[in-house]
Image (cartoon, grey):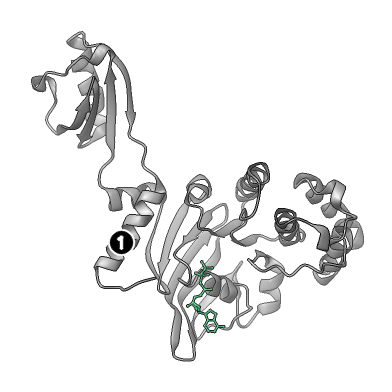
Amino acid sequence: MKMIYAENLTKHFADFVAVQGINLDVQAGQVLALLGPNGAGKTTTVRMLTSVLRPTSGIARIAGYDVVEEAEKVRSSVGVLTEHHGLYSRMNADEYLTFYGRLYRMPDSLIERRKRELLEQFGLGEARKKKLGEYSKGMRQKLALVRALLHNPPVLLLDEPTSAMDPESARIVRDAIRALRSDQRAVILCTHNLAEAEMLADQIAIIRRGRIILNDVPERLKQLLLGPEEYEITLRNGAGVPPEVLPLGVVVSRQENGRYVFRIDQPEEKIPLLLKRLLDQQLPVLSCAPVPRSLEEAYLRAVSLHEENGNGSN
Ligand SMILES: Nc1ncnc2c1ncn2[C@@H]1O[C@H](COP(=O)(O)OP(=O)(O)OP(=O)(O)O)[C@@H](O)[C@H]1O
């Protein structure tokens, strides 16, 4: 099912175009990472998807509900974590979540159960009676996430979910996002943390100046932006590879002290052949592995290519 769907979604603020013609399709069980520089249009997109901002044109549906026509149903189908989550500082976590649970029209017994489970899961069990004004930034962020999950929505829109969190809390939140995905939810994750996007996302969309400039699975995105994958083979004691043993389509791109990096066309076919030839020559092969490439590298490349193509700053 198309849990998060947008077609030609556009938002103008007076004559400023914040979001232009965005298309999205996130299925149940998938995480889409929305990446882009400051001011690119991520938050504006999320606000349209949650019926907070009315699109200038285009359509969007959350769990099948239209964001303009069925705003009430959209709000009950979506859990949102925004950058400014305005917690009420005089309430404690218990009161705050009860307040929201009732807004979502949840029965009190369910509110109690969800509160207990979620506060425990995010390590806030002991702080549930503490005033939110005394919470640290990371604790506030975790509570805002608990609030987003309280009514068990099928769609989650998370803006920088782990910013301000210590590494242990960030790990808990990432594990929670993974578990939610496998529970057949659709998630949009807006983040500047590319390592996090790489760990969690099934699909990456890069947004710049209000437009999606690329949208693909991480591996294809890397292939497209960084070229074919390279493989590194290490030989013991700096042994050398005689050029005549290389199969056609295998090229040495660099080498140093027995560490060879190869560019290989059709790696599934050529790597076994290459290894067989090296072993036939009694060469002491220690390891063979793809050279790791980060999403960060691919992202920076995408943004600089877009810039070079005359698309200005931001
Ligand atoms: N209410 C508004 N009125 C006028 N312009 C706005 C409004 N809200 C957002 N904008 C503009 O729209 C553009 C996109 O902003 P948006 O907050 O969506 O960016 P973002 O990608 O979420 O950035 P960040 O990574 O910094 O959070 C920015 O240039 C911003 O100034």
In the image, residue 131 lies at what x, y percent?
87, 60
241 vs 163, nearest the viewer: 163
The C terminus, quarter of image: bottom left
Residue drawn 42% across and 67% down? 207
Most distant residue in the bottom direction: 14
* Residue in view at x 46 percent, y 61 percent: 35
> Residue 115 appears at what percent x and percent y?
84, 54
Name the residue: 25% across, 43% down: 228
Q: Name the residue under label 1.
A: 304
Give the amino acid type for the residue marked by disc 1 in the picture.
Answer: Ser
Q: Quadrant of the N terminus?
A: bottom right
Which element is circle 1 on? helix
Residue 67 in the image: state x and y as whole percent. 60, 77
Vertical arrangement, residue 64 with respect to residue 29, above or below = below
Are there few (<14), some (14-19), or many (20+) residues within 10 Å of tag 1?
some
Q: Which of 239 and 121 lies nearest the eye of the viewer? A: 239
Residue 238: image x %, image y %?
23, 15
Relative placement, left or right, of 170 versus 291 is right
Tell me where residue 288 sits by quadrant. top left
Please say whether residue 106 is visible from this viewpoint: no
Q: Which residue is drawn at 59% across and 59% down?
A: 160
Residue located farthest toward the left when viewing the structure as drawn: 244
- The answer to whether the beta carbon of the residue marked 1 is less than 8 Å from any atom of ligand 1 is no
Residue lying at the far top in this picture: please name it: 282
Q: Depth check: give the residue in front, 59 or 33.
A: 33
Horizontally, is 117 left or right of 293 in the view? right
Above or below, 274 relative to 76: above
> Is residue 83 in view from this perspective?
yes
- In this rendering, position of residue 295 left or right of residue 264: right
Count the numbered circles shown.
1
